[in-house]
Amino acid sequence: MLTGVYTSGMGGWSFGTYHIITLFGYDNTSSTNKKVDYVDTASSIAGYNGLYFNFVSLDNLWWNISQNNVQAW
């Protein structure tokens, strides 16, 4: 699933910008630490210096999504 995020605080980004990522997995095995897997295809020219495959807590992801008005879900 594609969704818009604001990159502030996301791994690999040194600044905040509006961006699209691909969500591809969800780990619900822990009731207190839910994680979402995503792919970030931005290049270093765009200011991204992170990994291709990433994961983030559900709470942090929701914060990043709610800061961008381009959501797919």
Image (spheres, grey):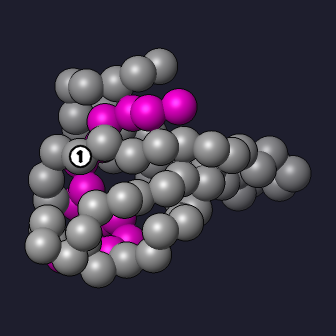
Is residue 8 visible in the rendered image? The answer is yes
Place residue 42 in its image quadrant: bottom left
Q: Residues within 10 Å of mark 1 (few under 14, many from 20)?
A: some
In the image: residue 11, left or right of residue 14:
right
Q: Residue 71: percent from the left, percent from the top? A: 34, 24
Main secondary-structure element of the magenta-colored stretch:
loop
Q: Is residue 63 visible in the rendered structure shown here?
A: no
Which residue type carries mark 1? Answer: His
User: How many numbered marks appear?
Assistant: 1
45 and 72: which is toward the camera:
45
Q: Residue 2 is drawn in which quadrant?
A: top left
Indicate the position of residue 1 as horizontal and vertical percent values.
Answer: 53, 31
Residue 49's x, y, as percent? Answer: 29, 80
On whether residue 6 falls in the magenta region, the answer is yes
- The residue labelled by disc 1 is 19
**55 left or right of 43 in image:** right
| Magenta span contains residue 50 | no
Q: What residue lies at 12% left-to-right and 73% top-to-bottom?
A: 45
* Magenta segment boundaries in residue numbering: 1-14
- Is residue 38 toward the left or the right of residue 70 in the image? right
Question: Under tag 1, what secondary structure?
Answer: strand
For the point 53% across and 65% down, which residue is it?
Answer: 54
| Residue at x 37%, y 77% (from the top left corner) | 50
Name the outermost residue toward the right.
29
Give percent across and percent down for residue 17: 13, 53
| Picture residue at 20% right of the left edge, 76% below the top | 44
Instruction: Name above or below for residue 18 compared with residue 2.
Output: below
